[in-house]
Image: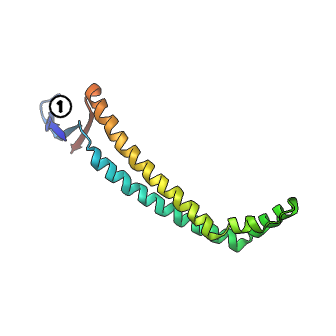
Amino acid sequence: MSTASKFARKDAAGRTSGREVRLKFVYVSVWSAARLALLIGCGFAAVSVLATILLWIVLNQVGAFDQVSQLFSGLSTTGGSSLKSALGLGPVLGFSAIAALLSVLTSTALGALGATLYNLSVRVTGGVLVGMTQK
């Protein structure tokens, strides 16, 4: 929760120079921080999966996978068919989805951990003071 203090401040002449609100953030809900981190992580995961699909489509249309497959088939005796199947849309999309899921789980855990560490550090520092002035 937050506490408000000092609604008005007087300047040197004794007049009020607008309203000033100063808030002190002394607690962050761990559950709320975890939920927010989960939502942000899901958004980033969706964007990364879509970007992977778009990048794969562009590279496929340009013919980059065929060139890489030809390069590796010239270097090895087994041929480049296994590489071409590994760079198909299915495996690439599966890897991207797994990486996105791990990213969501990591961001959720780090959001909750960050809120917990902030709540512990408030005992030492007293919290973050935020001031707003209306003129």
Q: Is residue 109 left or right of residue 14?
A: right
* Residue found farthest to the bottom: 61
**Screen quadrant of the C terminus:** top left
Decide: is 22 above or below 81: above
Residue 82 lies, in percent from the top left, at 75, 66
**Screen quadrant of the N terminus:** top left
The residue carrying mark 1 is: 11
Quadrant hosting residue 9: top left
Residue 84 lies, in percent from the top left, at 73, 68
Residue at 15%, 35% in the rendered image: 5
Q: Is residue 49 left or right of residue 86?
A: left
Graded by Cα atoms within 10 Å as few (under 14), some (14 to 19) or many (20 or more), the crowding at tag 1 reads few
Decide: is 27 above or below 56: above
Quadrant hosting residue 28: top left
Q: Between 126 and 91, which is closer to the camera in this rendering?
A: 91
Looking at the picture, which amino acid does disc 1 mark?
Answer: Asp
- The number of numbered discs placed on residues in the rendered structure image is 1
Residue 50 lies, in percent from the top left, at 53, 66
Residue at 32%, 40% in the rendered image: 115
Q: SS at mark 1?
A: loop
Q: Between 12 and 57, which is closer to the camera in this rendering?
A: 57
Quadrant hosting residue 124: top left
Q: Is residue 72 left or right of residue 105?
A: right
Which colour assignment does the render follow? rainbow
* Residue found farthest to the top: 124
Residue at 14%, 29% in the rendered image: 13
Decide: is 1 above or below 65: above
Q: Between 17 and 124, which is closer to the camera in this rendering?
A: 124
